[in-house]
Amino acid sequence: MVHDSDRLSDLLSRRKFLSMSGTVGAVALAGCSSSGDDGDDGSTDNVDGGGDESADTDDTGGSDDADDGNDDSGNDASLSVWYSIGGDKGDLVATLAEEYGEETEGVALSSSHEGSYGETFDATLRGIRNNDPPALAHLNAVHTVPTYNSGSFQPIQSIIDDVNPDDYIGAALDYYRVGEDNQFMALPFNASSPVLMYNKDAFEEAGLDPEGEEYEPTFQEFRNVCEAIVDDAGFDSGATWGNITWFVENWFALQNQPFVNNENGRAEAPTEVNLDSDAAERFYTWWMDLYDDDLYQLSDSWGDARQAFVNQDAAMLIDSSSNIVAQRQAAEEAGYEMGLLEVPSSEETWAGALIGGGAMFVPRGIDDQTARAAGEFAKWVASPEQQARWHQGTGYYPVHKDSIEILEDDGWFEEQDGMRLAMDQLLDSEDTPATRGALIEDHGQVRDLLSNGADRMFDGEDVSSVLSDVKSDVDELLARSA
Amino acid sequence: MTRIELDGLVKEFDSLTAIDGVSLTIEDGEFLVLVGPSGCGKSTLMRTIAGLETPTEGDVVLDGTAVTDWEPKDRNVAMVFQNYALYPHMTARRNMTFGMNSVGSFTDEEIDRRVEETADILDIADLLDRKPAELSGGEKQRVAMGRALLRDPDVFLLDEPLSNLDAKLRDQMRAELQQLHKEIGTTTVYVTHDQTEAMTLGQRVAVMNDGEIQQVDSPQTLYDFPNTQFAAEFVGSPAMNVVPVLVEHAGDRWFATHEQFRVPLPSGEGLAERQFAMGVRPEDLHVVGESQHESAHIDGTVKVTEPQGDALLVHCRVGNDTLRVLTDSRASYEIGDSIGVNVDDRRVHLFDPDDGRTVYHSEGQQARTEAILE
Amino acid sequence: MSTIQRKEIFESKWQAALLVLPTLTVLAVFLYYPFVQTIDLALQETQLLGNAEYVGLSNFEQLLTSDRYRNSLWVTTWFAVLTVSGSLLVSTYLAFLIHETVRGSSWYLIAAIWPYALPMAVAGSILNFIFHPELGIFTNVLEVLFGVSLNWHVDGTQAFLLVSAATIWKGIGYNVIFLVAALGLVPESLDEAAKLDGIGRTQRLVRIYLPLISPTLVFLLIINSIRSFFGGFSLVDIMTGGGPNEATNLLIFNLYQDSFTYNQFGLGSAQSIVLFLVVSVLMYVQLKKVEKFAYYG
């Protein structure tokens, strides 16, 4: 499944499915006449064609942020943005969009939350099929290949050809580079990577340095810390995180081991998953040993893991950096102090963290003016000021390099203990095929196969035999979609 | 063989009192008929004996043992239901043996033998392999009887067992029941709303109304000396005439005076000068010939005639009341004819108009005692 | 006589056709057309944007050779057996208890029905919470009382049993409504006759009531079977997501995942046809074979 799915909107979409499966499943049992309606797909707030109602904005506000590349257009460009983040973070997205709409002349902007990344992707595909796509779709990193292969999206680099790729944090932008000309399909908006959050009070109780300065990010050291926490601080377990394959892919990147072959699928479509690598064996063995020795608590979902960390069942949590701000607040309310450390890796190599999160994609089938306006908006939300603000509100890393300066000037990193360290994991990342992350057509399905495999290991099956089973299943899948 | 004692039984359902203080003893081997209109509590009383209802107050005593709190199955009581309650998915044989097999206190051979015997008695040997749906009403009745008999119960309870049968079959079954009771001699309680059935079957008949037993007596006593106006009117067909009278004492004689006529009473025992309800059965009224008309007690006008085959029932208007008179079936009366009617003054009953109790039988207390002793 | 009359009701065939037309239209639009489309889709390999090519029966071939699908079939079979028999047993016993209750039986009836009235999504979320292996309020109780340690996020058997139990619990209300009504139609005198015969409660339930309510039981068997194939989706989706390691991957969930998560509509349509055939055959067998055991007065 796609990472960081919003639980409630997930449920809502399942309801939609239920009404649909009525037709698919019970169709010839003749009795049930419920029907899946595809009718409400594109009916969100996007207005077709050049709307003749101007957005009557006054241009007193700063038009300084956006490069005003579309001043020459006579009519307002009608710009619909579909995004995939809900909750407080989603409200911030809506606010950003609203502000942009107000302060930018010539653009009538409407934004709508379509659900999870997967749901936004589905909705966008339906929009394209019905010739009514949004101008901008906020999709997940794993959608890079499907959008490219479908031929129904235009690489955003071809629209905003005036940007300098070097302005953006390499690890964030590089994931979206695809194809022979290595163009980036999308402009990143929200970037995150796995980070290690820890309970400082627990560290102190366990006789460890609460500031974590002695901590080395290695598998062995991590295990030692877990043991100390369980033995000396009286915790049920040392650490927890969900059985989420994005984390596993991150451990591939950390050990500089491409997840799939063909340069992590960037040279050509991958045919093999590298589950037979030493890196895979090392990581899984370490993970299962932690579990078998009750040092690691398996969590079923993101929420479960966070809950266990807040309840102080576990003293360490591996989570998305996008959750730092919220998690720190939860820790405060629970009465302990939270710190940030590097995710451990093997001692052999350290290449860098894997990016996750989302980016702005532009579908085909919209006129050039709208596409340009979409590109400008994508640039604007990726601009140093907005990214600094976005980072402070959520914990997602800024994708623009200049944001860091703004944040430094603001004294943000002194205020947010450990944030800089977390960000350095990304900034210090080497640019290798492994750290760029894998490009796979059926990325979601591959992730599910791996998390099922991990389930089998937790259930006691042998690590290497499960890995070889899963590898053959994944390879079969890759062969099918190749 | 069992003697049943009911001691001050009361059964209340929420706001309704179904049995209102019944005490009654049913002797070992007796055939007692409980009769009363529907809703009088007779079925509830029987179900209380069976253990299907728990009394609110009072006790059920079988052979000196209070069984009030016992489960139905522990009382060794067999019951035949109005609708027979045959298990529709089982053959007649299975219906009869189901309980015995389940309880397990009989061996298979014993059960087989008893089924054969019972089937012989009831003449249902050919029907044993049929299911209830393939049986006629009378046949179902026999199977239901067979099921009850088979277990050799201490008490036999029959709840309106004949009411779903046609008239001819009912007569036949009635005779068979009597015959059967003579043969097996089990204490039997029989509930019916049909007073004819009650009179023909019972050694003793208990008349119930409004949750109370009005009278328990032999059929003839019940007929001749009803304890209450209710019993008097309920028993007998056609029903007893009841008209308001004023009892008067003139000279040394007592009279019951109606607005239209006056009947002399043989004695004044227990009487006072006041209003009573006078009861006289249709067969104790006689139409007098033309010649004796002058001497008749009552002058009436023919209102309706009902030929009954063996007799003719004449409804005649007397003042504001109507009297039913049984006459010779061959007599012919036209509506509107004026007739003279004599009252058999030995067969007059007087009821207290307030509580309905019988105050006076003109045949006297003496005769009544004799009747009971017969 | 009646046939003559029937002919005279309508003046012409056209009038009759006109009257049937609305129903036919609804059926055609919402049932027959989607069904035909499903068959059509099942023969194609679909890409993301609906570009598709005809691939004959290869979707079906893929299903037949897929371990994942075979496992899903197996899981669904067990799920159906367990939930249908469990649900019927528990509901019958509950209905019998309610039937026997003299006072306040309608309250018990309501209490038995309310889980059915609870939306699946809500029920699933609540169960997730109270049976959570680490945080659930029942988890400790179970451990203390029965020594069962809940670990269903990892243990496939436990997850399967939990989802099955939840499905049974959810379905009880529906069955109980029918069964209480059916039990109420059995003449009370039969029960009383049996009591007088000295037949115990269990025997009365098994030997008297069950045969007499068998038509209702057959009906519920069929409805429950259909539901077990199509209805387990919500709980699985909310509670286990088909896992751990596909231990709760019901056919309907597998179908959903392939179609809507992995965007393989062709494969999903093929599964929908397989599911339809499986259930059709099952219904046929049940109607032909089990119906014989039902007693219709």
Image (cartoon, coloured by chain):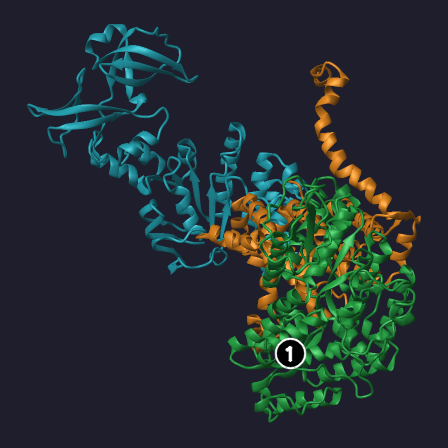
What chain does badge 1 belong to? A
Q: Nearer the viewer, residue B52 or B190?
A: B52
Q: Position of residue A440 (x, y in %)?
A: 85, 64
Q: Which chain is orange?
A: C
Instruction: Tell me the residue at 25%/36% (across/down).
Output: B368
* Residue at numbered disc 1: A419
Q: Nearer the viewer, residue A209 or B329?
A: A209
Q: Position of residue C240 (x, y in %)?
A: 69, 64
Q: In the rendered image of this protein, does residue A326 appear above or below residue B273?
A: below
Q: In the rendered image of this protein, does residue A450 appear above or below residue B131?
A: below
Q: In the rendered image of this protein, does residue B194 appear above or below residue C87?
A: above
- Judge whether residue A119 can be spotted in this image: no
- Image quadrant where residue B372 sits: top left
Q: Colour of chain B?
A: cyan
Q: Position of residue A147 (x, y in %)?
A: 82, 57
**In-image side of B298 versus B4 (left or right):** left
Q: Which chain is green?
A: A
* Quadrant that contains the N terminus of chain B: bottom left
